[in-house]
Amino acid sequence: MARLALLPAVAMTLLSVASPAQAAGYRYWSFWQADAGGGSWGYATQGPATARPADGEVNGFRFAVSTDSADSTRPRTAPDFAALCADTPAKPGTKRIGVVIDFGTPADAPEGEAPPAPEQRTACAQVDPAASSAEALAAVAKPLRYNSDALLCAIAGYPESDCGEQISAAEPTAAQSPSPASDTPGTHSGQNAQNAQGGPDTDGGPSLGLLAGVAAVLALGGAAFLQSRSRSRRRRG
């Protein structure tokens, strides 16, 4: 009987393993860069306040929900410097930086807010040769908002108050339903992470093998219980 008493506990343990706690993500502005003539986005390795882009480079900013840099959603506009700065002639003593701002989708917006229209904006910042990416952004998309840790919280006033807020992974996000990107697909680890979502057991639920194990434990428990009752009846007889 002691063994029978342990069976429900074992089953509950297996079920608890089958339903792991959902990981959280963060809603924030990610920062992207593309070299002159590069043609594809790469996740920036430093913040906009310290990055010093060269003339002809393109900076991208995307507001979305991501777990980390590996699954961040890229700007949906391609980093085409020639198109972005076609109407801004070169000027001595300055540099031109293409700027792409993607405010994301309604699914990415904080509660009570919506992405500004249009959701995707482009500009050509003509700034001092020593200017940082943050200074190039400020030249075309004020007001900006930063927190005390120098994290970029808002571009052109969006969002109004959030800053890198943690959210439940159960919320629908653009990263879970990726929008078509106009640059070459699969060039960033985030795209590879999205492609991997189609594999088995990616919905966060228990695997078939684990459920089969739970069923087996319960079946054994039922069989043992019936055997025990049968023995008791024979003894009474």
Image (cartoon, grey):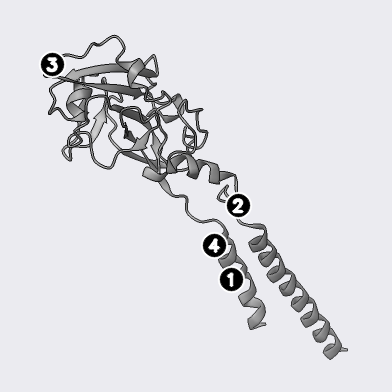
Residue that appears at 80% across and 81% down: 227
Reply above or below: 51 against 2. above
Reply above or below: 21 against 46. below
The residue that mark 4 highlights is 17
Earlier in the chain: of badge 2 and badge 3, it is 3
Residue that appears at 71% across and 69% down: 216
The residue that mark 1 highlights is 9
Earlier in the chain: of badge 3 and badge 1, it is 1
At label 3, counting other C-alpha atoms closer than 10 Å, the crowd grade (few under 14, some 14-19, many 20 or more) is: few
Residue 72 pos. (x, y %): 40, 39
Report helix, strand or loop for mark 3. loop
**Do the residues bearing badges 1 and 2 touch, measured as CB atoms within 8 Å?**
no
- Quarter of the image containing the N terminus? bottom right
| Real-space Cα separation, disc 3 to disc 4, in angstroms | 64 Å
Residue 149 pos. (x, y %): 17, 40
Give, as a three-letter code, the residue at label 1: Ala
Earlier in the chain: of badge 1 and badge 2, it is 1
Residue that appears at 59% across and 71% down: 9
Report helix, strand or loop for mark 4. helix
